[in-house]
Amino acid sequence: MQPADAEHLARALRQFYADAEETILVELARAVERSASAIDQMTTRLETQRRMMNAVDGILDKLDSDLPRAVQDLVDLAHNRGLSVASSAAAEAGIEGAIGGEIADTGTNVQLARAATNNMKGMRMQIRRWTNDTFAQAGLSAAGDIASGAVTRRDASRRMLTRLARQGITGFKDRSGRNWEMGSYAEMVGRTTVAQAQLEAQAQRLQELDIDTVIISDAAEECELCRPWEGQVLSLSGSTTGRLSDGTYVMGTLDEARGQGLFHPNCRHSHSIYLPGYTRGPKKDTADPEGDQLRQRQRSYERRIREIKREKAIAEQFGEDEARAANRKLREKQSEFKAFRDKHNRTAKTNRTNIHSR
C-alpha cells in the first residue's frame, strides 16, 4: 500500500467540508456587509443573524445527510484494498490459498465508519458557535473603530471579519490537543480512518494465512515519531519474538509500535508482508529530517495561500476594489510559492491550495 492511497480516498471527505466552509464564509461576509450598511443597526443585525444561521443550518443539514454513506463507502473500499494487497503479496510468495478465502465479518468497517462519522458530525456545534461569534466580534470591533473616527462601519467590519476568517473555521481538536481548521480536520479524520481500514484488513488477511510478521514502510520526509520504526519487522500477534531464520530481529508488536506513535493521525506509513528469506531485508539509514522540514515549509505555504483565498472570497462581498487587492496579494504569494518549489524540486499539490478541494 502506498501512502498516497489514504490521502486520495480521504480527499472526498475534505471536499465536503471545504466547500461547506467557503459557502459559510460567504454567507457570513454577506451578513456582516448587510448589517454594517444598514441604517437601523439593531433590528437589521438581529434579522440578518437569524437568516445567516438558518442558511448555515441548511448547509450543515446537507453535510449530515450525505456524510454517513460517503464515509462507509470509503471505509469499505479501503478495506477491500487492504485485502487485495495482502492476498496478492502472499500469492506472489507462493503461499497456497492466498487468493480467495474470506475474513470473518467482525464489524470493524461499520465501527470505523461510525466513529469517523460521529467525529465529523461533532464539528457542527463548533461551526455554528464560530459563525455566531465571528459575526458578533465583527460588529463589536466595528463599533470600537468607528468610535475612534478612523474608518467607516463597513470598512471596520470587513477588516475584522477578514482577520477572524483568515484561518478558516477553526477549533477542532484531535486527541493530542492539536487545533485544526475545518477542512483539514475532516481530511485528517478521513485519511486516518481510511489508512486504519486498509491496514487492519491487510493484517487480518495475513493472520488468516498464518503469517505473523510485517515490515514497516519507508516514507519519505518522515516525522520523528515514525522514523525509528521504518524498515523494522513487527509481529502482528506478539507470538513471534527474537531473531527470525534469516537473522532479522523482530522489534516488537504492531500494537507496541502504535502505542509509541506509529500510524498517528495523517501518518503516511504502512506495513506489508515479511517472510524470512523471501522479503527484502529492512532498509538502513532511512532518516530524512531535511525532507521533513521542506514538507513542513510547503504545508506552511499551502496554508497561507488558502488563507488569502478565504480573504478574497470575503473581499468579493464588499466590492471590486477589495477583491482586486486580495487578488494581488494572492498572486504574489503564489509566485513566491512557485519559486520555493522550483528551488527545492517540490511537486505542486493543487488540491492543498484550492479552497474547494484542499
Image (cartoon, rainbow, N blue to C red):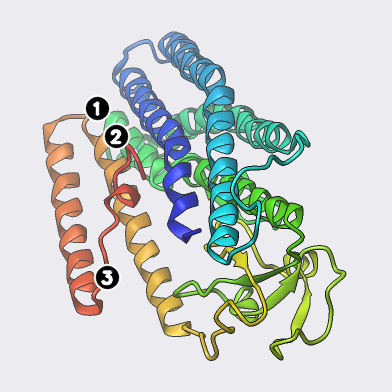
Mark 2 neighbour density, 10 Å: few (under 14) some (14–19) many (20 or more):
many
- At x 66%, y 67%, the residue is 262
Looking at the image, is 334 positioned above or below residue 307?
A: below
Task: Residue type at mark 2: give it.
Answer: Ile
Between the residue at mark 2 and the residue at mark 1, the CA separation in whole angstroms equals 6 Å
- At x 25%, y 60%, the residue is 348
Front residue of 256 and 101:
101
- Element at badge 3? loop
Front residue of 87 and 348:
87
- Element at badge 2? helix
Q: Pointer 2 and pointer 1: residues touching (CB < 8 Å)?
A: yes
Name the mark nearer the viewer: 3 or 2.
3
Q: Return the residue at label 2.
A: 314
Q: Return the residue at label 1.
A: 317
- Element at badge 1? loop
Labels 3 and 2: the sequence-earlier one? 2
Between the residue at mark 3 and the residue at mark 1, the CA separation in whole angstroms equals 35 Å
Mark 3 neighbour density, 10 Å: few (under 14) some (14–19) many (20 or more):
some
Q: Quadrant of the C terminus?
A: top left
Q: Pointer 3 and pointer 1: residues touching (CB < 8 Å)?
A: no
Q: Which mark is residue 222?
A: none
Q: Return the residue at label 3.
A: 346
Q: Which of the 4 quarters of the picture holds residue 76? A: top right
Q: Pointer 3 and pointer 2: residues touching (CB < 8 Å)?
A: no
Mark 1 neighbour density, 10 Å: few (under 14) some (14–19) many (20 or more):
many
Task: Residue type at mark 1: give it.
Answer: Gln
Mark count: 3
Q: Which of the 4 quarters of the picture holds residue 65? A: top right
